[in-house]
């Protein structure tokens, strides 16, 4: 159970009293930059996202029995969503800042199908809303990058 908690809380970030989701998303941005994940191949980035998604579904389903559905301690979903927003985005501080702001907006506001996805049972609901928020963010960011040079 300790390993599940470490994964779900992104090594303890989820235990922060306020802003754990924002800190987890920021930590993800910093990790993508530090590890140069933006330079990884398409397949490596897809594998990274798939592992995060299925690990998140797994640990969230187990921990919701203890912490309740979509506990604010679980922040692997923010890491997933932020990773999806950064998918195939070339590194620049502007790109990463825009990805961060867009993802946090969609994650907090939960427009369109984001809120509906949150209602899915078990760990699926925990992860799907952030996956969709990340997709919305990534699509918008790709369109911005394509039309404006940063």
Image (spheres, helix red, strand yellow):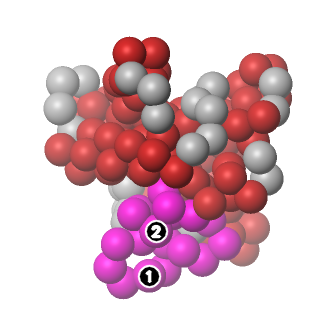
Determine whether 115 is above or below 136 in the image: below
2 and 1 marks in contact (CB < 8 Å): yes
* Name of the residue lying farthest toward the bottom: 17
Q: Residue 32: x and y, percent?
A: 68, 50
> For this view, does 90 lie left or right of residue 35?
left
Taking the magenta stretch, the answer to whether it contains residue 76 is: no
The answer to whether residue 116 is above or below residue 104 is above
Image mark for residue 16: 1
Q: 22 or 145, which lies in front? A: 145
Question: Counting other residues with Cα less than 10 Å from the Cα at mark 2, is it few (<14), some (14-19), or many (20 or more)?
Answer: some
Q: Residue at x 75, y 67 (%)?
A: 3
Q: Position of residue 82 (x, y in %)?
A: 50, 44
Q: Name the element at disc 2.
A: helix
Q: In this view, does 98 lie to the left or right of 91?
A: left
Write down the residue under mark 2.
Answer: 23
Q: Does the magenta stretch include residue 23?
A: yes
Q: Distance between the residues labelled 2 and 1?
A: 9 Å
| Above-or-below relation of 36 to 11 | above
Q: Residue at x 48, y 80 (%)?
A: 15
User: On the image, which quarter does residue 145 sit in?
Assistant: top left
Q: What stretch is highlighted in magenta?
A: 10-27
Disc 2 or 1, which lies upstream in sequence? 1
Residue 73 seen from this side: no
Q: Residue at position x 37%, y 55% from top? A: 69
* Residue at image location 43% in from the left, 50% down from the top: 97
Between residues 136 and 59, which one lies in front from this camera angle?
Answer: 136
* The N terminus lies in quadrant: bottom right
């Amino acid at each position: 159970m300790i390993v599940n908690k470490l994964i779900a809380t992104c090594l303890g970030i989820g235990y922060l009293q306020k802003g754990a989701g924002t800190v987890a998303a920021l930590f993800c941005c910093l990790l993508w930059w530090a590890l140069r994940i933006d330079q990884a191949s398409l397949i490596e980035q897809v594998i990274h996202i798939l592992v995060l998604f299925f690990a998140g579904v797994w640990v969230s389903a187990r921990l919701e029995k203890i912490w309740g559905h979509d506990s604010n301690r679980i922040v692997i979903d923010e890491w997933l969503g932020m990773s999806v927003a950064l998918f195939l985005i070339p590194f620049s501080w502007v790109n990463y800042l825009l990805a961060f702001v867009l993802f946090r907006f969609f994650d907090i506001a939960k427009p369109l199908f984001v809120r509906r996805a949150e209602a899915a049972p078990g760990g699926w609901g925990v992860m799907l809303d952030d996956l969709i928020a990340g997709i919305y963010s990534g699509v918008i960011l790709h369109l911005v990058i394509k039309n404006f040079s940063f």
